[in-house]
Amino acid sequence: MTPILPVMPVPTEAARLAERERPAQAAVMYQRWRDLLFLHWAWDAKELQRTLPPGLTIDTFQGRGWLGIVPFAMQGVRPRFCPPIPGISNFFELNVRTYVYDAQGRPGVWFYSLDANQWLGVTVARTLFHLPYFHAAIAVRPGTAPEIDYRSRRKGSSATSRYVYRMPEPAALAEAEPGTLEFFLVERYRLFARHPSSGVLFTGRVWHEPYRIGPAAVTTWDDGPAKLDGFDCQGRAPDHVCAAPGPDVTVFPLEPVAAPAGVLADPDTSLAPDALPA
């Protein structure tokens, strides 16, 4: 007998805008994200779908899925009940990600990996947030301002990935307009994570002011982190590049994702029609 899968409702524009509202519950953590570089490759939606756990559907823009590499700085990371701790609260992170939605049509981020050069942060994030963090050696060398020279090597890997980029001038920064590709890629306020042993799917919210983004001049880039996660860009340059100085961020607790309702479909049509590649 052919198995049947749930159909997921595609996020509406109203649902995407609603994600920017601050959640009502108490926060668990505060952070500052700084000097973010967003590198994105258009990707076959069906290929990305095969990498997702049950309960999530690949989110698409004009029929295409997207794979992102995002290096940046984490500053002032602290639980709600204590101040930042010198030597622990500031570090660097690089994540590989795609975009998804759940059975309630809520859009968010699915992380394939998150590399960080703070072992305690890696341990806490893996334990409390069920996220695939890895310890990495990361160094950021300031270039000719506002240029950034970012180098990362995941523990156990011999390859160093390097990103040299120039942040946008303040006059070039603006909020992404709803309905644009930029809005689809950067305006994400929800993550999804799967418990490594039970397989339970969780979701968590963050809140911050909308990103102010602009064009980034990137002279050196690397798809090595994506290759470590099973994606080979084959030397193809990113299809979309932008950068942001970064916001102050409030983090909210995880909660389990409700099981999909019993709407059923053939597996070959388990992606919603307008989520399929053109």
Image (cartoon, rainbow, N blue to C red):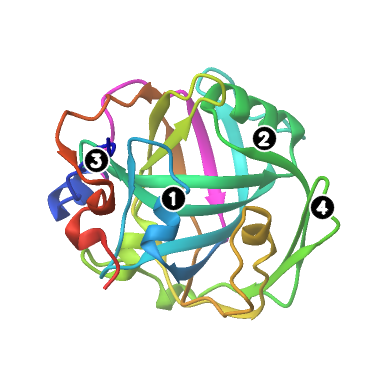
Which is more toward the observer, 179 or 141?
A: 179
Q: Quadrant of residue 76?
A: top right
The quadrant of the rendering that contains the N terminus is top left
Looking at this view, name the residue that lies furthest to the right: 158
User: Is residue 200 at all visible to an observer of this figure?
Assistant: yes
- Is residue 29 or residue 232 the one in the foreground? 232
Locate the C terminus and report the quarter of the image it occupies.
bottom left
At 37% across and 61% down in the image, what residue appears? Answer: 45
Q: CA distance from mark 2 to mark 4?
A: 25 Å
Asked where in the image residue 235 lies, by quadrant, the reply is: bottom right
- Category of crowding for the residue at label 4, using alpha-carbon neighbours closer than 10 angstroms: few (below 14), some (14–19), many (at least 20): few
Vertical placement of residue 250 versus 246, above or below: above
The residue under label 1 is 50
Image location (x, y in percent) of residue 160: 80, 62
From which residue to which does the magenta span run? 20-35
Q: For this rendering, which residue is in front, 278 or 103? A: 278
Q: Nearer the viewer, residue 75 or 258?
A: 258
- In this image, 12 relative to 68: left or right? left
- Mark 3 against mark 4, which lies toward the viewer? 4
The numbered mark at residue 21 is: 3
Going from N to C along the chain, the mark reached first, 2 or 4, is 2
How far apart marks 4 and 1 lie (CA) works out to 25 Å
Task: Identify which residue is drawn at 66% across, 61% down.
Answer: 227
Dot 3 alpha-carbon crowd within 10 angstroms: few under 14, some 14 to 19, many 20 or more: few
Q: Are marks 4 and 1 in contact (CB under 8 Å)?
A: no
